[in-house]
Image (spheres, rainbow, N blue to C red):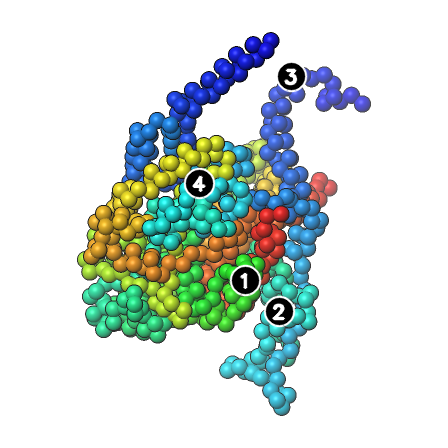
C-alpha cells in the first residue's frame, strides 16, 4: 500500500506543512476544544474550576414541551372573553412558576395555537435558541436558491463579448470586496424608517402614496430586509464562480447547437446547464455554508432584534460566549450548527451526485 | 568556599539594595480612551508630571479604543499579561475583582473620604477602584419650551412625579411642534440601557436582582413594581412619546439641539456641547416614580491588577492622579463631574452657580450604583434585551419572567458567584 502520500515526498510535505499547521491550530484544535467545552460549564472568566456537566448544556438548550392552558371561566362556568370575543387564558406563569409543576420552571413561550377553549403553548427553556434556529433556516432557504439564481442570471448577462462589459463585471463584483461591516452600516441608512433612501424612493415612485416602513424596526420586515441585503452583497462573488463555469463550456457545443437550430432556451437547457453541473454543486454548498454563518449583518444592523426576529445561531453563539461569558453555551450552539451544516452538505452532495 | 559564599551573598545583597534605592521601577498602565485627543492629552500630562515628580517609578501608558477595551483586558488576563494600573467601567469591577484580575487598593479608604460615592468601587467590603469623575444623567429641557407648555420646573427637593412627567410629555406631544416628546437614546444599544433606564425601574421599586443576597431576581425583576415599570415603559412607545429601538443614531445625536424632541434623557458628557448650541437649555432631575428620583452612578475608575509586582508604586500613581487639580482638569475638558467638592470649585462648570453645578447635586443625591456583583456583566445584557423587547411591544410579564429566568440560570451556573 504505497501511495504518493506515504512515499518519500519531502518537498510535498514541506509545502503542505504551513497550511497543515495553520489548519490544525486554528480550525481542528478549536473544533475539538469547542466540543469539549460544550460538555463542561466553561466560563470566559471565572476564578472557579471548570466542571464536567455532561449533556446539561444541550439539555438546557433543546428542552421543549407543549402545555395546555384552559380558558378562564366565570362562576357560571362560561368562558370569559375579551373585548374582541376571544377566549381569555390564564398567564403562562401560572404553569412555569407553579410549585406543583417544577418540570416547567424556567421555560418560556415560543408560540401557541388556540383550539376552542384550549391554548396549546409550546414552551422551551431556551426560546431564543429555537427562534435563532428557525431564523437561520429561513435565511438559508431564501438566500441559497435566490442568490444562486440571480448570480447565474448575472453571469449569463456578462458572459458576452460587448464593449465595456468589464465595467459591469466590476460593478457587480464591487459589493463583495467592500467590508461587510461597511455595507451593513450603509444599508442601515438605506433602511432607516425616518428618512431612509428606500422609503424616500418608494414614496417618490408611488407619488407619495407609500407609507414609510421602519424596515429594520418592524419584526415582520427586519429579517426580509437583511436577507435582501445579504443576497445583494455576495451575489457578485457567486456570479464570478458561475462565470468561470460558463467559460469552461467549449464554444463548439454552442456552434453545434446553433447549426441544429436550437432555441435560446434549448441551448441553455441542454448545453449550458449540463456544463455547469459541478459549478452548481460548488455554488450551492458554498452559499449554504456561508448563509448558515450569518453574523456581521445582524451584529451591525439589528443585534438580533426587534423581538428576536433576526436572531441567528452564530450571533447567539458569540453573544453567549463573549457577551454573557458563557463559553460552554456558545460552544454547544456551535456544535449543533456544525452538525446541521454537516448533514445538509451531505444531503446536497447526495442529491447532486453523478448518476 | 565559605568565603566565596559570603562574598556572593554580599554582592547579591548589594545589587538588590542598589536596585531598590536607585533604579526606577517601570509600571505599565492601560487606558480606554484611545482616539479621544483631549482625554489622552490629560492622561499623558498626568503621567509626565508623575514621572517627573519622583524617580522611583516610571509609568508608561497604552491606550485602547473603548469598544474593544474590556475584551483586551480579558484576553490579557487569560494570557497573564495584565498591566500594573488599568482603568475600568465601574459596574464591571466586581466581575474582575471576583475573577482575581484586581487587588484591593493598598490605600486607606480614608484618603478618598471626600469623593462622591459613585466614584468609589467597593466590592466585598474592599476598595478596588477609584474614579477621577462620575457621570450623571438628567432631563434636558429648554426653558422656553417649559414656559410655553406651562410646566413647573422640578427641583432636587421636589422632582416631577410620574403624573407630572407624563403630562409634560403629553403636553409636548399635543403642541405638535416635535417629532417626539422625549429622546431616550434608544439607538445607543449597549451599557446605556441599564445605566440610563435601570434607575427608572429602581424608582418604581423594582430592580435587577435581589441586592441583599444577590442570589435571585425572582420578585425583583418580575414583581408587581417591575410589571408597573414595564407597562409604563411600553406606553412611552405605544403612545409615540419616544422614538423606539430603531431610532437613527444621528437623530439621537442632534435631535434635541435641532428641536425635534422637547426633552432628552441624556448624560452630562453631552451637556457642554448642548449648551453651546442651545442657549436656554436646563438640566432637570429625574422624575420620582414612587421610590425617589434615581440616576445611575459609577463611571470609569482606576485600579491595580492582581499580578502587579509594584502595587505600592501603582498606588502612588493613583494617589497622584486623584489630586484636585487633575480632577478639575478632566472636568473642564470633558464636562465630567469632578469627584470632590473642592475640585468642583476649581472648575468652570461645576463651581457653585456654574452651569452644570446641578449635576454635582444630582450625582450626590440620586446616584444609585448598578448591582455590585460579578454577575452584573450578564444581568446588564439581560436587561438590555428585556428593555428593548418591551419597547418593541413584547408582553411585559412574559418578558420580565423570561429575563428573571435568565439571570437566575446564570447565577446557578456560576454557583452563586461565590469563590469555591
Q: How many marks?
A: 4
Specify the quadrant of the image occupied by residue A283. Answer: top right
Give the distance between the C-alpha atoms of the residues marked 3 and 2, in whole angstroms: 67 Å
Label 4 secondary element: loop
Q: Are marks 3 and 4 on the same chain?
A: no
- The residue where tag 1 is placed is B217
Which one is closest to the eye, mark 2 or mark 4? 4
Q: Position of residue A314 (x, y in %)?
A: 56, 48
Q: Residues within 10 Å of mark 1 (few under 14, many from 20)?
A: many
Give the answer, above or below, for where B121 lies relative to B8.
below
Which residue is drawn at the image coordinates 41% and 62% (left, top)? B199
- The residue where tag 4 is placed is B106
Q: Are marks 4 and 1 on the same chain?
A: yes
Specify the quadrant of the image occupied by residue B29. Answer: top left
Which residue is drawn at the image coordinates 59% and 48% (left, top)? B419
- Is residue A146 at all visible to an observer of this figure? no
Q: Earlier in the sequence, mark 4 or mark 1?
A: 4
- The residue where tag 2 is placed is A97
Amino acid at each position: 500500500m504505497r501511495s504518493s502520500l506515504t512515499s518519500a515526498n519531502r518537498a510535498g510535505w514541506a509545502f503542505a506543512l504551513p497550511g497543515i499547521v495553520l489548519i490544525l491550530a486554528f480550525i481542528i484544535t478549536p473544533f475539538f476544544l469547542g466540543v469539549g467545552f460544550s460538555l463542561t460549564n466553561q466560563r470566559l472568566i471565572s476564578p472557579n474550576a471548570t466542571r464536567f456537566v455532561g449533556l446539561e448544556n444541550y439539555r438546557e438548550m433543546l428542552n421543549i414541551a407543549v402545555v395546555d392552558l384552559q380558558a378562564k371561566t366565570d362562576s357560571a362556568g362560561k368562558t370569559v372573553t375579551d373585548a374582541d370575543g376571544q377566549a381569555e387564558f390564564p398567564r403562562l406563569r401560572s404553569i412555569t412558576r407553579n410549585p406543583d409543576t417544577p418540570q416547567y420552571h424556567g421555560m418560556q413561550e415560543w408560540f401557541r395555537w388556540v383550539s376552542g377553549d384550549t391554548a396549546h403553548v409550546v414552551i422551551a427553556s431556551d426560546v431564543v435558541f429555537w427562534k435563532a434556529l428557525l431564523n437561520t433556516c429561513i435565511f438559508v432557504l431564501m438566500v441559497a436558491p435566490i442568490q444562486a439564481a440571480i448570480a447565474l442570471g448575472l453571469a449569463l448577462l456578462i458572459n458576452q463579448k460587448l464593449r465595456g462589459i468589464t465595467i459591469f463585471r466590476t460593478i457587480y463584483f464591487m459589493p463583495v470586496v467592500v467590508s461587510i461591516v461597511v455595507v451593513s452600516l450603509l444599508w442601515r441608512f438605506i433602511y432607516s424608517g425616518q428618512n431612509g433612501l428606500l422609503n424616500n424612493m418608494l414614496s417618490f415612485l408611488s407619488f407619495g402614496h407609500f407609507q414609510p416602513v421602519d424596515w429594520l424596526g418592524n419584526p415582520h420586515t427586519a429579517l426580509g430586509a437583511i436577507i435582501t441585503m445579504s443576497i445583494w452583497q455576495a451575489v457578485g462573488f457567486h456570479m464570478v464562480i458561475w462565470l468561470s463555469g460558463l467559460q469552461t463550456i467549449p464554444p463548439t457545443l454552442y456552434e453545434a447547437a446553433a447549426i441544429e437550430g436550437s432555441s435560446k432556451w434549448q441551448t441553455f437547457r441542454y448545453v449550458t446547464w449540463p456544463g455547469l453541473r459541478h459549478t452548481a454543486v460548488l455554488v450551492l454548498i458554498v452559499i449554504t455554508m456561508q448563509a448558515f454563518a450569518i453574523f456581521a449583518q445582524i451584529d451591525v444592523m439589528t443585534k438580533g432584534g426587534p423581538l428576536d426576529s433576526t436572531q441567528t445561531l452564530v450571533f447567539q453563539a458569540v453573544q453567549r460566549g463573549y457577551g454573557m461569558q458563557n463559553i460552554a453555551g456558545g460552544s454547544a450552539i456551535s456544535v449543533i450548527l456544525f452538525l446541521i451544516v454537516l448533514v445538509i452538505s451531505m444531503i446536497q452532495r447526495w442529491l447532486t451526485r453523478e448518476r | 568556599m565559605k568565603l566565596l559564599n559570603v562574598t556572593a551573598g554580599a554582592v547579591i545583597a548589594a545589587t538588590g539594595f542598589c536596585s531598590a534605592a536607585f533604579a526606577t521601577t517601570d509600571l505599565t498602565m492601560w487606558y480606554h480612551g484611545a482616539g479621544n485627543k483631549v482625554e489622552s492629552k490629560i492622561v499623558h500630562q498626568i503621567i509626565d508630571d508623575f514621572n517627573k515628580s519622583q524617580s522611583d517609578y516610571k509609568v508608561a501608558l497604552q491606550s485602547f479604543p473603548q469598544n474593544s477595551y474590556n475584551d483586551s483586558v480579558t484576553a490579557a488576563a487569560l494570557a497573564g499579561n495584565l498591566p500594573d494600573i488599568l482603568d475600568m467601567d465601574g459596574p464591571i469591577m466586581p466581575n474582575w475583582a471576583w475573577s482575581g484580575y484586581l487587588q484591593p487598593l493598598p490605600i486607606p479608604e480614608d484618603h478618598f473620604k471626600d469623593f462622591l460615592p459613585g466614584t468609589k468601587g467597593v466590592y466585598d467590603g474592599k476598595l478596588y477602584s477609584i474614579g477621577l469623575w462620575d457621570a450623571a444623567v438628567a432631563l434636558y429641557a429648554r426653558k422656553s419650551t417649559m414656559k410655553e407648555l406651562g410646566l413647573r420646573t422640578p427641583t432636587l427637593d421636589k422632582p416631577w412625579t410620574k403624573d407630572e412627567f407624563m403630562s409634560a410629555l403629553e403636553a409636548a406631544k399635543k403642541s405638535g411642534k416635535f417629532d417626539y416628546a422625549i429622546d431616550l437614546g434608544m439607538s445607543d444599544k449597549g451599557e446605556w440601557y441599564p445605566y440610563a433606564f435601570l434607575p427608572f425601574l429602581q424608582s418604581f421599586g423594582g430592580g435587577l436582582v435581589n441586592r441583599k443576597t444577590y442570589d435571585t431576581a425572582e420578585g425583583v425583576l418580575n414583581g408587581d413594581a417591575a410589571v408597573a415599570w414595564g407597562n409604563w415603559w411600553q406606553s412611552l412607545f405605544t403612545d409615540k412619546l419616544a422614538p423606539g429601538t430603531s431610532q437613527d443614531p444621528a437623530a439621537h445625536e442632534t435631535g434635541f439641539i435641532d428641536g425635534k424632541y422637547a426633552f432628552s434623557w441624556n448624560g452630562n458628557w453631552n451637556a457642554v456641547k448642548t449648551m453651546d448650541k442651545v442657549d436656554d437649555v436646563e438640566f432637570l432631575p429625574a422624575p420620582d416614580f414612587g421610590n425617589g428620583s434615581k440616576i445611575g452612578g459609577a463611571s470609569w475608575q482606576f485600579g491595580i491588577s492582581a499580578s502587579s509586582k509594584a502595587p505600592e508604586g501603582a498606588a502612588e500613581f493613583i494617589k497622584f492622579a486623584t489630586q484636585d487639580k487633575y480632577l478639575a482638569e478632566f472636568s473642564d475638558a470633558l464636562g465630567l463631574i469632578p469627584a470632590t467638592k473642592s475640585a468642583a470649585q476649581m472648575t468652570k462648570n461645576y463651581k457653585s452657580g456654574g452651569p452644570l453645578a446641578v449635576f454635582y447635586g444630582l450625582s450626590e443625591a440620586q446616584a444609585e450604583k448598578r448591582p455590585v456583583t460579578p454577575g452584573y456583566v450578564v444581568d446588564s445584557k439581560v436587561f438590555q434585551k428585556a428593555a428593548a423587547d418591551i419597547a418593541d411591544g413584547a408582553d411585559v410579564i412574559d418578558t420580565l419572567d423570561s429575563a428573571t429566568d435568565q439571570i437566575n440560570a446564570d447565577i446557578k451556573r456560576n454557583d452563586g458567584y461565590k469563590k469555591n
